[in-house]
Image (spheres, helix red, strand yellow):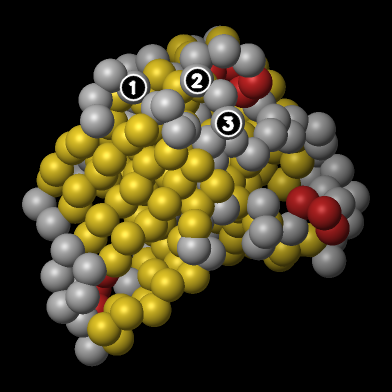
Amino acid sequence: SQQGEEDPQALSIQEGENATMNCSYKTSINNLQWYRQNSGRGLVHLILIRSNEREKHSGRLRVTLDTSKKSSSLLITASRAADTASYFCATAPIYGGSQGNLIFGKGTKLSVKP
Amino acid sequence: DAGITQSPRYKITETGRQVTLMCHQTWSHSYMFWYRQDLGHGLRLIYYSAAADITDKGEVPDGYVVSRSKTENFPLTLESATRSQTSVYFCASSVQANTGELFFGEGSRLTVL
């Protein structure tokens, strides 16, 4: 049961540019979270935005949530080579599948070239 | 250091063998999870546990068994491994309800020949 779908699947940018990744989902959610995964490593939590929030910031990260469109975006400003990783959105559905547990999308693979 | 550790990190086994992947966390988090990560599928929930002695199925539980006799340990057993279970397995924990922030281990890469 794929709830979140990230777009694009892959993104390649130069250091210093901004990177924007999008996530669309299907059902009503409690919250939406973004995670980063470096190659060969576990996922690391970046930010959580609740359904009643529209925007959240954390350092160079900016997350927006539009519940009417069932979509979220993650913006990384002034990207660095160290930001190269896969980024996943995860949604916590209010009703239905997965017993309310987080459902992960397939991820966006970001490559930041020095 | 506190954290969540998985072992083994890499395992090669043969079809039909039993394999157990271990997960240990030092935070005393109530919730623990097992996910598998496959190309084209992202992360899929296998089993989760809300507390010691409480476990429940996730999206893809067939062929797997879990137990949680102690809060800190959540082993995942493949009773008779199949090639389709070749994957990277991640254990995670959460301090709050099952919709809170997840803390992941580094993963166990399993190859079934």
Question: Residue A26, labelled with which disc?
Answer: 3
The residue beneath circle 2 is A28
Q: Position of residue B103 (x, y in %)?
A: 35, 39
Return the chain for callout 1: A
**Rendered position, A113 above or below B103:** below
Q: Quadrant of residue B53?
A: top right
Indicate the quadrant where residue B57 lies.
top right
| Marked residue chain, label 2 | A
Badge 3 amino acid: Lys
Q: Do the residues at discs 2 and 1 belong to one chain? A: yes
- Tell me the SS state at disc 3: loop
Q: Secondary structure at mark 2?
A: loop
Q: Residue furthest front?
A: A68
Q: Tell me the kind of residue under disc 2.
A: Ser
The answer to the question of whether label 2 and label 1 lie on touching residues, with beta carbons closer than 8 A, is yes
Cα separation, mark 1 vs mark 3, equals: 14 Å
Residue visible at 43% across and 39% down in the picture: A71
Q: CA distance from mark 2 to mark 3?
A: 7 Å
Residue B4, percent from left and from top: 36, 41
Residue positioned 55% across, 47% down in the render: A5
Rendered position, B101 above or below A46? above
Q: Residue furthest bottom?
A: A114
| Image quadrant occupied by the N terminus of chain B | top left
Chain containing the residue with disc 3: A
- Residue at coordinates 59% horizontally, 35% vertically from top-left? A3
Amino acid type of the residue tagged 1 in the rendering: Ser
* Horizontal and vertical percent position of residue A112: 30, 79
Residue A40 seen in this snapshot? no
Q: Secondary structure at mark 1?
A: loop
